[in-house]
Structure formats: C-alpha cells, structure tokens
Image (spheres, rainbow, N blue to C red):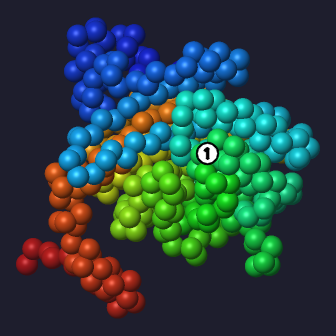
Amino acid sequence: MAQFNSIEEILEKYIPKEELQKVHRGLYGFDIQDPSHYLKFDPKVKGLADQLKLEVKSFRFPALAEELRKPRIVRIGAIQNSIVEPTDAPIRAQRDSLIKKISSYIAVAAECGVNALCMQETWNMPFAFCTREKHPWTQFAESAEDGPTTQAMRQLAARYNMVIVSPILERDESHGDTVWNTAVVISNTGKVIGKTRKNHIPRVGDFNESTYYMESELGHPVFDTQFGRIAVNICYGRHHPQNWLMYGVNGAEIVFNPSATVDSLSEAFWPIEARNAAIANNYFSVAINRVGTENFAHEFTSGDGRSAHHDFGHFYGSSYVTAPNGARSPGLSRVSDGLLVVEADLNLCRQVKDQWGFRMTQRLDLYAESLAKAVKPDFQPQIIAEK
Ligand SMILES: NC(=O)NCCC(=O)O
C-alpha cells in the first residue's frame, strides 16, 4: 500500500468544514481546529524545523484553575525519527549520526520550551531484531549509566534544563554482559535518575526480540522529576493493561510509551491502547512510534509462509498524547520525522480522578485476590454452564 501522511489530513481533505468539527469532537474529544489548543512558538522554531525537515506539532490540554493548588504546567515532548545511515554502515557511524540528528531535534524542543522529552524505542539504532542475527546488532548495546548515548543525552539535559527519557539497548556489564531493552531517565540537572526496562517482550510477527533480551526485573518504577512523576511503558507493554495500571498505582502522572511497530501489524490498535490507559489510570500517556522503512542486508523469514525479505515493513510514526480525561492530540505524520510538543497542567490528573472516581472504585483488593488464585497450579476458571 502506498504510504499516506496522516488520517487527520484525509479527514480534512474530504469532510466539509462544518461536519469536520463534529467528527473531530467525536474522535479527539475536542475541536482540534480551535486555535486555543495550539502553542505559539518563536518564528525561529519554524526556521530550524524547515532546515531539519522536521515536522513540529503542538497541542494544549486545558485544566480547571484551583484555589489551593497552583497550576503545574509542563511541556511534554515526543520525538519520532527514521534512521540516518543504511543498516550496513559501520555501527559507530549509524549510532553517531542518530545522536547528531536527535541532538538537533532536542535543540528545537528546547526552543519550544519542552520540559520532559522522550524518544522512540532503541532510538539510536535500526530496529534490527527482525533479523535474529546477533552480530553486528548487539554492538549497539551500551551502558545505561555512562555509555556514549547516555553521555550525550546528559549534556543536553543539563544544557536545556530538560528531563530526557532515552530508550536504548543496554549492555549490563555488572551482570554478565546481559543485554536489556531499557529507558534511561535523565534529570534536568544532567544526572541519571535511574532506568527502567521492557516488561513484556513480543513474540509476534518479525519482532524477534526474545532472541536478544529478557523481561525486566525492575518492576514499574516511577521517577519523581522537577516536571512531574514519570514512568516508561516500553512498546509491547502497551498491550498489557496491568502494566499501565501498575505505573498508575505507583503514582505516575506522565507515562511515555516509546515504541517501534509496523503498519501491517498494529496500526488499528495504536490510537486505542495508550489512550485507554490514560483514561483508565488518570495520567497523561505519550505514545511514540518509529518512522520509516529499514532495509537489512541479509534476508529473513517471518514464519508465515511468505518468502524471505529484507525489510520489516513501514514504521508508521503517528505519535500522540492523551490527557487523563481522554482528550487526545492530533498525531504526528506517518512518514516523516517529527516533534510533538504538548502543554499540560498536571493538576488535571487529580481533577479527573475526582470527577470519575476510577481510582476510588478500582477494587484492587478484589483483583489482587482473584489473580493470586489464577496463578496457582490448581486454578480452575470461574465458568458456569447451563445445567
Ligand atoms: N517493539 C515492539 O515491542 N514491538 C512489538 C509490536 C507491537 O507491539 O506492535
């Protein structure tokens, strides 16, 4: 199928203006053409973005003014990107070209006033796990604490006073050189606050990631930053509501979902899962997907009868943010690099909790008890048949 830029663009092209407002309200929870939902940036931003061929989109989620709490306004940034060098270029050239490109995007994010930013899953390398080859891809794995990517991101975080969440392939030298799929959370002071790892590893399509790394043993950490309590649900973890739930239980206000997923597999789920998580758990969710098509020198098979091929399919971008009340921003492009900047008042999390009472009515005790029974070897599903 020929690629198209975005669903928003198609809707705008074919739906009459007066009907479009209704469609947008139904789909996004807002009239997304209302100019009050967009941020005004210095004209410098457009110049920089044009130069870099970077799509920059913004959105603003309003919240109520409270009498006893000051607004907690933060600007959340999401970057989606294609690779720079071909996948058979030297590893260092591939990685460093991506660090250079993303550093220039982070400079634009800084101009847009972004306070907390996240990139896509394993942003500094091609998504090579489809190949099942260890060599050369595991060479991209690096220390989460002081590898070259983390060092570069630490400098930028301090320079721009920005929390940066950097999802990478981690090499854990202290534990037998183990490889992990990790997100490093870097404070706006430039210090590494900590790291979190992918909890659920896909075994679907060409996502052969279980060949490379295991499920996280770090639980569901939430990082208390100057710009809100942040958690990271890495890619395939978004299919597991209990994963999203636990970040909420631990107090997250913003949950990033750095991803790499292709149109033939998951595009129908994409607008639903992170959005639903924001609604169910009363936090902001930030879904970020890789963009572009990546080709690999050695062909690989998918175990589905198709002949061997050299690419994974199209990573369809479409990154977006959902507010705790279910309203969502328009998405970034399906085909080009982009930066989404969303202004949010974190007070909205509590306001929606109070309005809907989802946390209060959650019945965690009921599910803790039921699940404790369900994981026992002698468990029998509670099915009642007609007698
Ligand atoms: N990277 C990753 O976990 N992808 C799995 C496919 C999907 O979740 O859509």
Q: Residue at x 27, y 44 (%)?
A: 325
Q: Is residue 83 visible?
A: no
The vertical placement of 240 against 85, above or below, is: below
- Amino acid carrying label 1: it is Asn
Q: Dividing the image into 4 quarters, which one contains the C terminus?
A: bottom left
Image position of 336 (left or right of 51): left
Q: Residue at x 78, y 78 (%)?
A: 174
Image position of 6 (left or right of 370): right
The vertical placement of 123 against 335, above or below, is: below
Q: Residue at x 44, y 42 (%)?
A: 74
Which residue is the extreme one toward the right? 90
- Residues 79 and 291: in front is 79
Q: Is residue 311 visible?
A: yes
Residue 363 coordinates in the image, percent (x, y): 21, 72
Residue 197 coordinates in the image, percent (x, y): 60, 65
Image position of 314 (left or right of 270): right
Residue 307 coordinates in the image, percent (x, y): 71, 42
The vertical placement of 236 against 7, above or below, is: below
Query: How would you rate the neighbour count of disc 1 (Cα within 10 Å): few for under 14, some for 14-19, many for 20 or more?
Result: some
Residue 17: which quarter of the image? top left
Which residue is disc 1 drawn over? 161
Q: Residue at x 40, y 89 (%)?
A: 377
Residue 335 coordinates in the image, percent (x, y): 60, 26
Residue 368: which quarter of the image? bottom left
